Image (cartoon, rainbow, N blue to C red):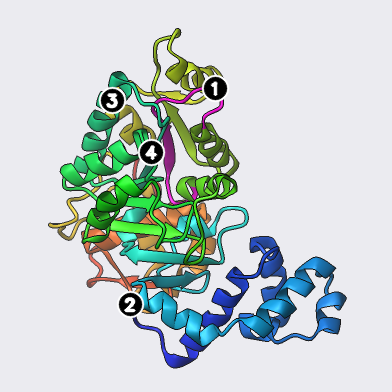
Amino acid sequence: MSKNLSQAEADETKYWLGFNLVSGIGPAKFRMLHDYFGSARAAWQANEAQLVQIGLDRSSIRNLIEARQSTDLDAELDKTASAGSTLLTWLSPEYPLYLKEIPKPPPLLYLKGEIRRSDQWAVAVVGTRRVTPYGRQVTRDLVAGLARSNVTIVSGLARGIDAIAHQAALEAGGRTVAVLGSGIDQIYPPENLGLAESIVAGHGAIVSEYGLGVKPEARNFPPRNRIISGLSLGVVVVEAGERSGALITADFAIEQDRDVFAIPGNINSPASKGTNRIIQGGAKLVRTVDDILEELNLTMLPDKAAVQLAMPESAEEALLLSHLSHQPLHIDELTYLAELPSRMVSSTLTLMELKGMVLQVGGMNYTLAREPGPTYDHQNKEA
C-alpha cells in the first residue's frame, strides 16, 4: 500500500489486491470489470447475475465467488505491509507512467524500495543466463556508461546478464529496478537475494505483479518480460541464443513501441545467434554506450543531485512552457494542447522538473516553477 494512502484509498486498494489473487482474471478482464462497475470494490461485490450480464465467463465468475468467500482482504493487506511491500494500482500517482501505456498493464504492482520519477529515464538490459566472458565485459561497460549518464537500469534479476547488469549499476552508483517472475518475497534465483537487498537499500526497487508466496514458475516469466520493457525507453539485448527469453522481451518492446538494441557477437557463438538475428531484423546495432544515449536522446540528462534553473533547450520544452502558467494544468490537457505524444510530454516534463523549470503540484498537474521571463517563441527555435 502506498505510504500516504488515506483510509478510503486503502479500503479501495484491498479490492485490487483481491482481484489480483483471483485465478483467471487478468488485466483485460479486470479493466472490463473496473470500467463497468466504476471501482474495484463495486466489482468485487457484484452479484452473479451482474457478472454474467457484462460477459464475464463462467470459470472466472466461479473463481471470483470462491475467492470472495475464502479471502480475508484486510488480512491480505496486513500481510503485504508486514512483508515491507508497497502496493501501486493504475490509480496510484507513483505508478510508472510508461508502464501504464502498454497493452494490458498490470493493475497492481508489489513494490519494495522506491521508484522515482527520474526512473522514467530507464533502459532495460537483458540477455542469456549462460553468459560468456565477452557478454560479461560488454554488459559491465555499457551499464557503467548508462549509470554515469543518470539512466536507470531495468532487468529481471536472473542469472547471467540480468544479475551482472544490476550489479554493474550499483557499482557505478546508479539506480536499478528488478522485475520478478515470482512474489517479491520469493527471490529467484536464491543466490541473488543479497543483490535484491542491495537494490532495495536506497538504490532502486524490486517489483512484481505476482502476489506474496507465488513461486517462480516458468509460465510467469514471459508476462514478467512485458513489464521489463514497459518500464523502459528501450531494451538492450547483450547475448541471447535463438530461443532465449531475452528475445521475448525484445518482442514486447516492439509491441510497446520501444527501441530495441542488440550487441553484435561472433557468428559462430551460440550466445550471439539471437542477437545477430534481431540485428538482421532491424534492431539497432550497439558499439558503444553513445549509440544508445543518442538514439534515445538521453545525452543531456541533468545531474540528479545538482540541477539548476535553465532556459528551454529543445522545441518540446519551449512548446510545453508556452502552455503552462502558475495555474495548475493536467498532463492530459497539456498533451492535447501541445499535440505531442504522451510519452514525450511525460519525459520532457520530468526533465523540466529536475531542471527547476516546472512543478508537479499533485494529481499530475503542472505549473511554472518561477516567474516567466521574456516570451519564448518556440516556433522560431531550431529543433
Residue 362 shows in the view:
no
Disc 1: CA contacts within 10 A as few (<14), some (14-19) or many (>=20): some
For the C terminus, the image quarter is top left
Q: Is residue 19 left or right of residue 258?
A: right
Return the disc, 1 or 3, that comes first in the chain's sequence: 3
Span colored in magenta? 230-244
Q: Is residue 151 above or below residue 368?
A: above
User: Do the residues bearing badges 4 and 3 touch, measured as CB atoms within 8 Å?
Assistant: no
Magenta region, mostly helix, strand or loop?
loop
Task: Give residue 155's position: percent from left, percent from top.
Answer: 39, 44
Q: Amino acid at mark 1?
A: Glu
Disc 4: CA contacts within 10 A as few (<14), some (14-19) or many (>=20): some
Q: Amino acid at mark 3?
A: Val
Mark toward the viewer: 1 or 3: 1
Q: Is residue 377 above or below residue 47?
A: above
**Which of the two residues, 32 or 120, is positioned nearer the viewer here?**
32
Q: Is residue 314 left or right of residue 10?
A: left
SS class of the residue under badge 3? helix
Alpha carbons under labels 1 and 3: distance apart: 19 Å
Q: Which mark is residue 296?
A: 4
Task: Give residue 40's position: percent from left, percent from top.
Answer: 62, 80
Q: Which mark is residue 326?
A: 2
SS class of the residue under badge 1? loop
Alpha carbons under labels 4 and 2: distance apart: 31 Å
SS class of the residue under badge 2? loop
